[in-house]
Image (cartoon, rainbow, N blue to C red):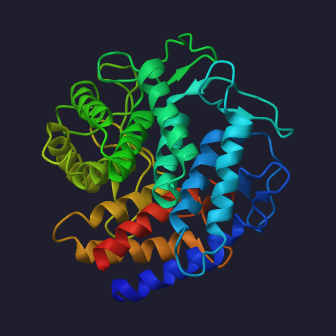
Amino acid sequence: MPSASPLLNTVLTHFHDLIVPLWQGPGWHAELALPYEALDADHHPLPPQRYRAMACARQLYLFASLIGEPKADFAQTRAAALFRSLQQHFHDAEHGGWFYSIDPAGQPLDTRKDLYTHAFIIFACAHYWAKVREPLVASVLNAALEVVAQRFASGDGLYDAVLERDWSSLSSGPLQNPLMHLAEAFLATLAVREDANVQAALLHLATAMQQRFIDPGHGVMLEKPLGAVDNWFEPGHQFEWFFLLDSSDVLRGTPLHASLSRAFAYAELKGVDNASGAVSGMLDLDGNVRDGTQRIWAQAEYLRALTLRPGSEAVLQRQLLALQQHFLHAKGWHECLDAKGTVSRRDMPSTTPYHLATCYQGLIKYLG
């Protein structure tokens, strides 16, 4: 098997020379100054049905992460355009917060307020502010943190997944995935500044997740709160949570960290194919595969998490090779493979480079 470093150089070249330029050229709607939601396999934008604030924020993170990198003189200009678009197209001047989506003409479409979107706005603005230190970016970061604390918080350490435009309740309750990305957003904020309120909220969230979302049998993080009907867990989310917890001085050593360390082993045992490196999509609590779809984000999260697992060098090399051979190709990437490894989605969403960027940063740090 080839050593990891030359293979990492190969996938990094693919990322910087092929994937990033897709979102500078064919993936960029110049008039709206927004990324198209997805490109087809031949780099044509899929006919737009909507543009999401979350997708804008993920691309803001992508280009902010490239500011200051060699051969990335374009990054600051593009990040600035995305930051402006986030405010121009999605900010709700009347009620505060940010809309979920706009239509192809740039008018509000889904005006609900969802935690997932707001978490990514915090995450992107924290990274962007770290690079540019502009007061307006700090202002938007603070506004997003305040909205989450005042509007989404349910008082028990958790947060509602979605609210109406005017912040009235939709009785959504909490869901795992938005809360994970909120934890990620809090961590990104603490990485760029001291913030006692954010740190307290992060610890309160970790305590509540342990109490409300962790299956006591295997330590796995469930997608819905304990006791919910038709619950399941996703291996990719176990790996993603593990990385966030294990890489954080604040969260490492918490009961949630201990649970996800157990969950990692269980998800690896039941949800990863040792021969191909395939990560299954959904499992029931007994470890039976409910959805064998292989998604590139889950592959990336497993690979990133392996950088923090002692003794994982051989598995890490296997997974990096699997990512390169099964998901990356000369025109971009495969978003999904079915359980047999056949390509099942040929579109390339604008949100996926976020997962690849965070994965590769973890690998660069690990491999030095």
Locate residue 182 relative to residue 139 in the image: left or right.
Answer: left
Residue 255 location in percent, x, y? Answer: 14, 38
Is 126 situated left or right of 170 in this image? left
Q: Position of residue 174 (x, y in %)?
A: 41, 23
Quadrant of the image occupied by residue 2: bottom left
- Is 347 placed above or below 74 here? above
Which residue is at the front of the view, 55 or 66? 66
Residue 72: image quadrant is bottom right
Q: Quadrant of the C terminus?
A: bottom left
Q: Does 188 appear above or below 174? A: below
Q: Position of residue 225 (x, y in %)?
A: 34, 24
At a point 57% along the width and 57% down the height, the residue shown is: 352
Q: Nearer the viewer, residue 182 or 126?
A: 126
Quadrant the N terminus occupies = bottom left
Residue 7, visible in the rendered structure: yes
Q: Residue 287: x and y, percent?
A: 29, 43
